Amino acid sequence: MRYLLVYDIPDDRIRTKVADFCLDYGLDRVQYSAFIGRLSRSLMDELVQKIQRKIGSQPAKILVVPIPNDAWRQRVEIVQEAEADD
């Protein structure tokens, strides 16, 4: 299953560590605090638990959204790169 994981974490150190966790689990960064990728349910649960332990009692908002294959195929994606300065 594909998952979208987004977060809002005020603490820089915790936010950086959570990003590292996401990358370690093979998720791709799509925005500064948004990752997407394919994981089994058990691996996503493991990742969420790891994030929860790292956050502890600090303020944070984490959202994990499963994306079924049919919804993924219907996605619209616009990517526009910045023009190079000459």
Image: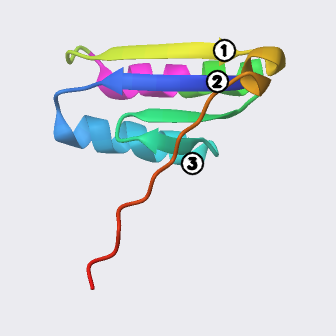
Which mark is drawn over residue 24? 3
First in sequence: mark 2 vs mark 1 = 2
**Label 1: few (<14), some or many (≥20) within 10 Å?**
some
| Quarter containing the C terminus | bottom left
66 or 78, which lies in front? 78
Return the x and y of residue 25 as percentages of the image width and height.
62, 42
| Lateral position of residue 22 relative to residue 42, left or right | left
Name the secondary structure under disc 2.
Answer: strand
6 or 80, which lies in front? 80
Residue type marked 1: Pro
Identify the residue under disc 2: 3
Which mark is drawn over residue 66? 1
| Lateral position of residue 64 relative to residue 67, left or right | left
Return the x and y of residue 78 as percentages of the image width and height.
53, 40
**Label 3: few (<14), some or many (≥20) within 10 Å?**
few
Q: Is residue 53 above or below residue 29?
A: above
Which color mode does the image show? rainbow
Q: Which residues are magenta?
A: 48-56
Mark toward the viewer: 3 or 2: 2
Name the secondary structure under disc 1.
Answer: strand
